[in-house]
């Protein structure tokens, strides 16, 4: 096995025992990036010199007796998260030449822990999308079939982990943007509870649902990353105090009640995805879990609510990109024309669509009918989850309605693209922890099983998902 193919847990053991060095591990990842990035376009920027310098420092710390879950572990970062001195384009021409002046809180915590930043990954522009086709710098390709999408918006991070370019990557999940590409690329993608990880230093999309999280090769690795990046932050008033992550190892699932919401098995769900997910549920039952059919009646409104609230927050958050303080600058005779030039040239079509939808929904005469009504239904969706978690410990469901689709097949149809998030938006709107774990292949493409838990039940959710993860084998594309 090549060093870049190791899990975090395997690498941690070898580093601590002196079998390998952080420099060896980093070089293996950098070589893999050179080998496959041209085929799948997962990375937008690679900091080879900086990564090797960090690896030398990590090796010195290990030799001096220091340790830690991520000391000497190489990773990649979604390009809407700031890392001082590196580009932060958010996949947009608007920020094509922007260099981050400071570290996001989560990056600062990873640096302190000794994790080694290799570079930045591709994404849908400003994280608006479910295929990574909306990047201004070209799409990322799915490593299982390069004619297909990797999912989005954290498609670059998911594809990088799937191809062993790094030992883990960070993404952001607003309405499924970690879980969706994780499912389509056959890796683990974890969306923590809202408020568990700081958003300071993320380029904001939808502030009320944005959550940074890890994409990894195993659930246990995700828990290791989360243990470092989570915690309250004075720079982000939405972060919450929580108990330290307590990850356990289970012998079986006896005594647990797992809910299966009927609203996640609907017309439009691919037959192959449904088959693999039902097989996974049968495995959980065989392991001792009680399987309970449950209902989340307001699930059907999740996509509609999300695509009213999200454009509203986007129109507000993207107002700052006017070319005056930072960002692309147009040429014009007067201020009004300057704004039109700057934003017209700097933003792509999907970003413009969302800005216009949000501005319309927030405008006088429409605010009550759209935005306010959506927030009321959001409360109903949250109450559905609260009620069902009085009956069960967690929920399982498909992550996506289908496996990876062909590049160019859906990107001109916004409704089809928005429906990719049908099983993902409800838990985001409610601020719940959720993750996607590979549950096999259908027609040689990965399928994801989604686990959803109550607010701040991250430790328990990861523990149970890890048990299932160990039942299945890791999916590895041949590329």
Image (cartoon, helix red, strand yellow):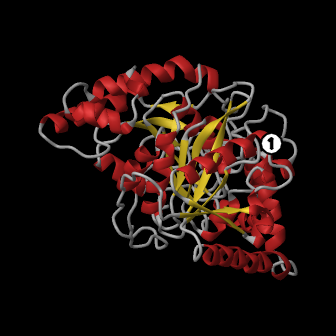
Mark 1 nearby-residue class (10 Å; few <14, some 14–19, many ≥20): few
Q: Quadrant of the N terminus?
A: top left
Q: Position of residue 392 (x, y in %)?
A: 57, 69
Front residue (pair 5, 136): 5
Q: Is residue 27 visible?
A: yes
Quarter placement of the C terminus:
top right
Instruction: Name, please, the residue furthest toward the left.
Output: 64
Which residue lies under the disc numbered 1?
271
The front one of 354 and 183 is: 183
Assign a secondary structure to mark 1. helix
Q: Is residue 397 left or right of residue 468?
A: right
Residue occupying image coordinates x 29% and y 37%: 12
Observer-nearest of 390 and 141? 390
Q: Where does residue 100 sit, x and y in percent of width and height?
A: 47, 47
Quarter location, residue 428 = bottom right
Residue at 48% of width from left, 55% of height from top? Answer: 464
**Above or below 79: residue 144:** above
Residue 308 visible? The answer is no
Task: Determine which quarter of the picture holds residue 360.
Answer: bottom right
Task: Give 76 or 185, whichever is nearer the viewer.
Answer: 185
Taking 428 as reference, is 270 above or below it?
above
Task: Locate residue 300, reporting x and y percent.
Answer: 80, 65
Q: Position of residue 344 (x, y in %)?
A: 78, 49
Identify the residue at horizontal 62%, vertical 51% (top origin): 281
The residue most toward the top is 35
Residue at position x 39%, y 51% from top?
Answer: 251
Tally of marks? 1
Say whether residue 470 is left or right of residue 446: left
Q: Is residue 184 left or right of residue 203?
A: right
């Amino acid at each position: 096995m090549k060093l870049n193919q190791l899990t975090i847990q395997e690498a941690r053991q070898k580093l601590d025992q002196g079998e390998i060095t952080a420099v060896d591990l980093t070089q293996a990842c950098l070589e893999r990036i050179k080998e496959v990035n041209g085929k799948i376009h997962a990375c937008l920027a690679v900091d080879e010199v900086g990564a090797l310098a960090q690896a030398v420092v990590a090796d010195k710390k290990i030799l001096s007796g220091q340790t830690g879950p991520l000391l000497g572990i190489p990773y990649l970062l979604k390009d809407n998260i700031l890392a001082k001195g590196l580009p932060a384009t958010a996949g947009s021409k608007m920020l094509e030449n922007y260099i981050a002046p400071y570290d996001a809180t989560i990056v600062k915590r990873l640096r302190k822990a000794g994790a080694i930043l290799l570079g930045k990954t591709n994404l849908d522009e400003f994280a608006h999308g479910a295929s990574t086709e909306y990047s201004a710098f070209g799409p990322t390709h799915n490593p299982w079939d390069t004619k297909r999408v990797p999912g989005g918006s954290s498609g670059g991070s998911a594809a990088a982990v799937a191809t062993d370019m790094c030992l883990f990557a960070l993404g952001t999940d607003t309405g499924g943007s970690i879980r969706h590409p994780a499912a389509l690329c056959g890796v683990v993608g974890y969306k923590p509870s809202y408020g568990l990880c700081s958003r300071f230093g993320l380029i904001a999309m939808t502030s009320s649902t944005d959550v940074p999280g890890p994409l990894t090769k195993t659930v246990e690795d995700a828990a290791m990353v989360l243990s470092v990046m989570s915690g309250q932050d004075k720079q982000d008033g939405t972060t919450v105090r929580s108990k330290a992550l307590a990850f356990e190892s289970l012998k079986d699932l006896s005594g647990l009640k797992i809910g299966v919401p009927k609203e996640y098995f609907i017309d439009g769900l691919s037959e192959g995805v449904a088959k693999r997910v039902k097989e996974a549920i049968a495995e959980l039952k065989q392991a001792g879990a009680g399987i309970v059919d449950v209902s989340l009646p307001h699930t059907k409104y999740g996509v509609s609510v999300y695509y009213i609230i999200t454009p509203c927050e986007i129109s507000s958050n993207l107002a700052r990109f006017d070319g005056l303080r930072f960002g692309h600058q147009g040429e014009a005779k007067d201020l009004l024309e300057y704004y039109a030039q700057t934003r017209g040239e700097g933003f792509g079509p999907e970003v413009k669509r969302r800005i216009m939808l949000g501005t319309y929904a927030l405008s006088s005469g429409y605010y009550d009918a759209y935005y306010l009504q959506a927030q009321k239904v959001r409360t109903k969706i949250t109450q559905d989850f609260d009620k069902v978690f009085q009956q069960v410990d967690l929920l399982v469901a498909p992550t996506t309605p289908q496996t990876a689709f062909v590049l160019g097949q859906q990107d001109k149809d916004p409704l089809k693209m928005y429906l990719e998030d049908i099983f993902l938006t409800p838990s985001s709107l409610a601020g719940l922890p959720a993750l996607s774990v590979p549950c096999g292949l259908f027609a040689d493409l990965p399928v994801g099983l989604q686990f959803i838990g109550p607010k701040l039940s991250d430790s328990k959710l990861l523990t149970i998902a890890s048990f299932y993860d160990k039942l299945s084998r890791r999916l590895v594309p041949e590329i």
